[in-house]
Amino acid sequence: METRPLGRSGLHVPVLALGTMTLGGGDFFKYMGDVQADEARRLLDVCLEAGLNLIDTADVYSQGASEQVVGAAIQGRRDQVLLATKGFGRMGPGVHDVGLSRQHLIKACEDSLRRLGTDYLDLYQVHTFDALTPVEETLRALDDLQRAGKVRYVGCSNFAGWHLMKSLAISEREGLVRYVSQQVYYSLLHRDTENELIPLSLDQGVGILVWSPLSFGLLGGRYRRGAPQPDNTRLANMEAPGTVDWERLFRIVETLDAIGRERGKSVAQVALNWLLRRPAVSSVIIGARNEAQLRDNLGAVGWSLSEAEVRRLEAAGDLPEPYPYWHQHKYASDRNPLIARNYVG
């Protein structure tokens, strides 16, 4: 499998990564999946055979159960995988059981290491922004974790553009560890990332890890115009992510399906391949409830959409640019060329 550098770092990652929100079950996450250790080991076998060795999890997934299942699955082969997890989420009732304070973050990292059965993380990510904790405090805690050998690289997730830019500036000013990656919600259906976060990544050398590339299954091919919504999916028990324009979704899925039929690929494979052509994307995180779903997602690599196919897909769901980007591209395009939108890598 192709590998790419993770931002401006020496770490190279496969273009597909295994997401583990489906591991461990639990009251809420059972709607994502309930994969336990034996099946997880089999899924990891399939991944490693395909060259996919990056595993992404988080402490809050099933309140630690996902990390425990991952730890059992990698036992005896820790050196074969790149292990990424996240800290921020509420892990207890106390005031310091959530967030990015030094008090919580160091404990959260150490608890994750224990659950995963390892003494270091290849990538430790803060799960979202914490407006109640100074950025300097968070970065210094991460810097100390790296200096202690518990963390090799650090990244962020679900930051706004100014959150990330402020963090990078403080890292440079104070000589602290720097975010090498940002994990973002991105798909053909949800392209907000293209307005600020992708241009920022390109400018600052921050690699992008994409989460929910099929928009919680909406782009998997099961949601069709005029058909009843399937009743055995995660969205049958959860609210749809963000704002969903169903007419726009159906246009996108119909175009994915048409191209898939022409190429002999599934709807999901075409949607994932489109993401792999986007600028600054280092890896796309795929989830799987079972081996068949995993193998289908792995079929997104080894081929590439044509420029004409990319244009067809983007035309099916293109949206107007928000201000100030439409102004920059309309009145100062010679100084502000389009970077993310209509880009073909």
Image: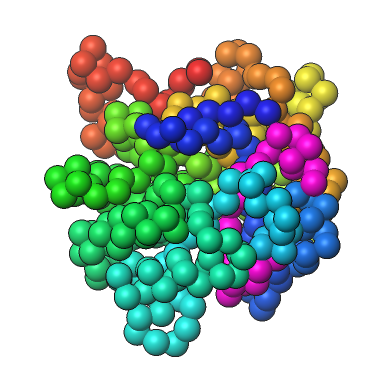
* Whether residue 48 can be seen here: yes
264 left or right of 343? right
Q: Position of residue 7 (x, y in %)?
A: 41, 34
Q: At x 38% / y 69%, what residue is drawn?
A: 106
Extreme-left residue of the structure: 173
Extreme-bottom residue of the structure: 93
Could you tell me what secondary structure mostly forms the magenta stretch? helix
Q: Position of residue 156 (x, y in %)?
A: 39, 51
Q: Position of residue 250 (x, y in %)?
A: 66, 40
111 left or right of 194? right
256 left or right of 125? right
Q: Is residue 333 above or below residue 13?
A: above
Q: Position of residue 59 (x, y in %)?
A: 53, 67
Q: At x 58% / y 13%, what residue is drawn?
A: 307
107 left or right of 297? left
Q: Using the rendered view, name the quadrant where residue 201 is placed.
A: top left
Q: Is residue 175 above or below residue 124?
A: above
Q: Which residues are magenta?
A: 45-69
Q: Is residue 279 above or below residue 162?
A: above
**Nearer to the camera, 92 or 107:** 107
Q: At x 32% / y 75%, what residue is drawn?
A: 103
Q: At x 30% / y 18%, what residue is drawn?
A: 337
